[in-house]
Amino acid sequence: MDLNALANSTGEWLRASGPESDIVMSSRIRLARNLAEFPFISRATDQDRNEIERQLRERILQIQSSGQLQYINVSELEGIDRQFLVERQLISREHAESHGARGVAIDGREQISLMINEEDHLRIQCMHSGLDLAAAWEQINQIDDLIEERVTYAFHPRLGYLTACPTNVGTGVRVSVMLHLPALVITKQIEKVFRSLQKISLAVRGLYGEGSQAMGDFYQISNQITLGRTELDLVQQVGDVVPVLIDYERRAREFLVREKHETLHDQVSRAYGILRTAQTISSEETMHLLSRVRMGVNLGLIPDLAIPDLNELFIHTQPAHLQKLRGVELDTEDRNIERARYLRSHLNKPDGHGAEHN
C-alpha cells in the first residue's frame, strides 16, 4: 500500500456520510483474538512472533468477502509512517511502538483494519462514519467468522475468548463511538455526563483511545465489561446511550444559541479568523479551534464550509500527515509553520472566503 497516496485521501469514517455525523464522528468495533497454539505476546519468543505473523497474514489474505485487503509490514516502517497509521486510527499506539514481527491488513475504504501481534495476536477493527454500530457489527462478525474457519482461537467453554489483558476476556469486544461534544464542554456539563457514564460501566477516552487526552472536544465512549454478556448486548448498550448524549449536546448547543449567541458567535468567528491568518500554530491549538469552527458550521454560523472539509483538516494537520503531505521531515517549529500555511491555503479562497474543495 502506498502510504504517501493514502495521505492525500480521506478515510470512509471521516467523510461525515453516516447517521448523526454532525456530532458522531465514527462508530468502531474491535475484537481481540489469540491463536490457541501460541503463548500470549507478552510471553512469546521472537520465533513465536514470526510464526504468528506468518500464519495470520496468510489466512487473512485468503479472505475474499472483506474486499481487497492490503498488507503492511509494520515492523519495517519508518517511525513517521507508523505514526501516520496511528493518526489514521488504522493501528494503535502500542502496535506502532512495539517490536518484532507485526503487521496490519487494511481495506481500500479504511473501514477494516486487522492488526497482527498487537497486545493480542489479532485485533480486528471495523470503523464506520457516524452512528452506525449495527453495520460495523455485521461486518466485523463476518470477518471474525471467516478467520475462525481457518485458525483455532484460544477459547474457554466457560470464560469465552482468552485474551492477554483480563479486561478483554469473554467476548473480547470493545464497542466505541467517537463524539464531538463542544457545547457540553463550554457549558461545563461534560464532567457530570462522564460520571453518569462511569456508573453504567462505560469508559470515556481521548481521540486516540486508551491513555490519550481529549483534544478538540472529541471523546470516545466505549464498554468496559466484556465478560458475562453477549457481543450484541454490548453493542446495544453503547448504541442505547449515544442518542441520549447526542440529545444532551444538541440541547446545550440550543442553549448557547438562545442565551449566549453573541459570545458563541464571537468564539466561532475568532477561531475561524485565527485559523485563516496564523503564521505558526500547534497541533493542540489547531484541534481546539477547528472544534469551535466545526460546531459553528453545524449551527449555520459559517455558511461556506462543509463538515467533510473540516474533518479532512483535522487529520491532515496532525504531525505525521503534515510531513507526509509536505514530503519532508520537519521539527516542531517548522511543523507549526507548515501547519499554519496549510490551513491558510485551505481556508482562504482568492476572494478571501471559504474552503478550497479538493
Image: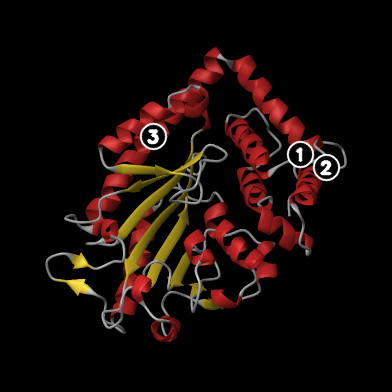
Alpha carbon distance from label 1 to label 3: 31 Å
Q: Quadrant of residue 73?
A: bottom right
Under mark 1, the amino acid is: Gly
Q: Residue at x 50, y 28 (%)?
A: 185
Q: Is residue 240 left or right of residue 276?
A: left
Q: Which of marks 1 and 3 is nearer the N terminus?
A: 3
Q: Which of marks 1 and 2 is nearer the N terminus?
A: 2
Q: Name the residue under label 1.
A: 354
Q: Quadrant of the C terminus?
A: bottom right
Residue situated furthest left in the rendering: 158
Under mark 3, the amino acid is: Leu
State yes or no: discs 1 and 2 in contact (Cβ < 8 Å): yes
Under mark 2, the amino acid is: Lys
Dot label at residue 349: 2
Count of residue discs: 3
Q: Residue at x 51, y 41 (%)?
A: 214
Q: Residue at x 70, y 42 (%)?
A: 282
State yes or no: discs 2 and 3 in contact (Cβ < 8 Å): no
Give the percent coordinates (x, y) of residue 158. Answer: 12, 66
Alpha carbon distance from label 1 to label 2: 6 Å
Q: How crowded is mark 2: few (under 14 residues within 10 Å), some or many (20 or more)?
A: few
Dot label at residue 74: none
Which callout, 2 or 3, points to the residue nearer the camera? 3
Q: Is residue 118 above or below residue 339?
A: below
Residue at disc 2, secondary structure: loop
Q: Residues within 10 Å of mark 3 (few under 14, many from 20)?
A: some
Q: Nearer the viewer, residue 89 or 238?
A: 89
State yes or no: discs 1 and 3 in contact (Cβ < 8 Å): no
Which callout, 1 or 3, points to the residue nearer the camera? 3
